[in-house]
Image (tube, rainbow, N blue to C red):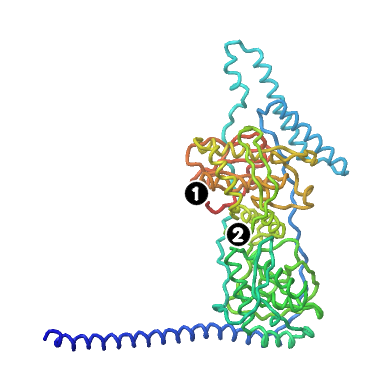
Amino acid sequence: MRKARLLPILLLFVAGGVNVQAQEEDLRKDFENYRKGAHKDYDDFRKQALMEYSDFVRQAWKKFGAEPAVPVPQEEEIFPMLAPGADQETASWFGRQMDKLKNMFKKKGKKVPDQLAQVEQLQNQQKAEEKKKEKKNKKEKAEEKKEKAEQQKPEAKKPVQMAVKQVIQPAPLIKQPEPLAEVKQDKFLENDYVEFRVFGTLCKVRIGENCRFKLNGITSDEIADIIRDEFPKTQYDNLLYDCLQERKHHDLSDWAYYQMLLTLTRKFYGENSNEGTLVLAFLYSQSGYKMRIAHDDSNLYMLAATRHFIYNKSFYYMDGEWFFLLDGRKAEKLSVCQAGFPKESSLSLQISAAQRLDMNPTGERTITSIKNPDFTFTLHSNKNYLDFYETYPSSNIDNNFMTRWAIYANTPLEKGIRDQLYPQMKEKLQGLSELEAVQQMLWWLHGRLDLEGSISNSDTFLYRYDEDCWGEDRAFFGEETLFYPYCDCEDRSILLSHLVRDLLGLDVILVYYPGHLAMAVGFNEPVEGDFIMLDGRKFIVCDPTYIGARVGETMPIVNNDDATVILLQKS
């Protein structure tokens, strides 16, 4: 009886379950149809934008003349100085270096700069004062010998507050451009993966013979026909999809991504071929970047809009923006297609995340502090990063030359360098106060002068002018300062800013005087010394070029009234 009563109830549950299952199946089908429709809408939207763009390409051309390249501004550099209280051997060595510097100018037939004479005069004054102190110390009684070391130290001077002439705000972080619409791959379209390397880093994308085409000429109609007939094909979607995946996988900056696309198209289509340039423009624009195609009747070019003004490259000024020819070629006059794509974004030279490049280790280098032989570190660099930085152009933001250093200082040190250097340095800094830790870092970076390039080893940082090393001013990323034997004031200040922010968690600013770059630290503990006040907070000057100086000591040669503060991002 009970079984008989339960049977209708069970049948109702079963029937209900079947209905629910059927409803769920219908919902799944509806969602799948919606998803396919949505993706089709995305796809159609991109394809429609290509169609409309090809129509504009047939007519929207105008001739432009190139603006001349602007060289990196050259300033008379502040000469390094030796802080008071240096031992006799160091003082003698520094004097010989200054004599060599004077001879360098004379050999080149140049007048010895007044600034150098001023440095010499200041150094001679310091020597004379130290000799007086030495004579006085010799006459002291035997019971005062214990205090001799303290009496030989330079007398503490009253801290100076710098007059801030200008404050350069940090540039906002720019979100990387994105495609106009979602890029879908077709896994059923079989194209072999082609491998290539950019900055020694392996990349691979699907590209085959079905991606080859021939431009018989570069008239507006011939270019438009390729855009209309070729680029909407599925194989180009797969190619674009793979390129964007490589950008994501390696955390490539805008500049590195452009270099990747350039390397790929040159490898597959030939260097500077018109077909390769057109595919470069397609991949670049469909990745979300603003570009304009142009020609000089025989060669096709891609001009890239940039958020930064780039030195040493001619440019075209159109619609209130700079467009640069970035592939190394030059063209005086070009016919430019003024058509663009919706939501396109200009290239940024910011590097907001550490890029993931393959490892290619250089030889090891040991760098030792001239003040503390125990403060020594051995590390190797990654040549792939050095190769990338070799291509990186010097630039500024908002037409302000001083914004360029923040770009270098805000670029994170690559993981390989951090993994080697930071644990070693943390161990040696353990137990020290903030002031003591910064002082050890500062002395480590002071190194020595080698203005003639005559010191054969590089077991310490060596100071030499960019013009003598590179032929022009060139700022270093932190990794470059750790690799190359020579560096100057800006390179040392940029590297020190990384170390203090990353290892001690302190805020730092760059301090620019005409011809010289130093740094200042916002300590959490009371610290005496020359300082800058910002929003009621004290930042103590640290100068990696004032050899042997202590935290809070400013080179006498600089004009404190001309200080410009460059704000940096936090660690």
Q: Nearer the viewer, residue 247 or 532?
A: 247
* Image position of 333 (left or right of 338): right
Give residue 376's position: percent from left, percent from top.
Answer: 63, 37
Question: Considering the numbered disc 1 on the image, is that residue within a helix, a strand or a loop?
Answer: loop
Residue 458 in the image: state x and y as whole percent.
Answer: 72, 40
Question: Quadrant location of residue 224?
Answer: bottom right
The residue at the point 60 percent across, 59 percent down is 356
* In the depicted structure, whether residue 287 falls above or below residue 123: below
Circle 1 is placed at which residue position? 535
On the question of residue 199 being in view, the answer is yes
Q: Is residue 210 above or below residue 537?
A: below
**In the image, is residue 15 above or below residue 327?**
below
Label 2: how many Cα within 10 Å (few below 14, some 14–19, many 20+): many
Residue 462 placement: quadrant: top right
Going by the numbered disc 2, the residue's amino acid type is Gln
**Extreme-left residue of the structure:** 1
519 in relation to 26, above or below: above
- Name the element at disc 2: loop
- Say what amino acid the circle numbered 1 marks: Asp
Q: Residue at x 70, y 63 (%)?
A: 310
Nearer to us in this view, 452 or 353: 353
Quadrant for the N terminus in the image: bottom left
Q: Rounded to the nearest whole Å, what is the CA distance between mark 2 and mark 1?
A: 34 Å
- The reply to whether residue 513 is visible in this rendering is no
Tell which circle, 2 or 1, labels the residue nearer the N-terminal end.
Answer: 2
Q: Is residue 182 left or right of residue 118?
A: left
Query: Image quadrant of residue 84?
Result: top right
Q: Tag count in the figure?
A: 2
Q: Nearer the viewer, mark 2 or mark 1?
A: 2
- The x and y percentages for residue 132 are 69, 20
Task: Name the residue beneath numbered marker 2.
Answer: 355
The residue at 54%/48% (across/down) is 502
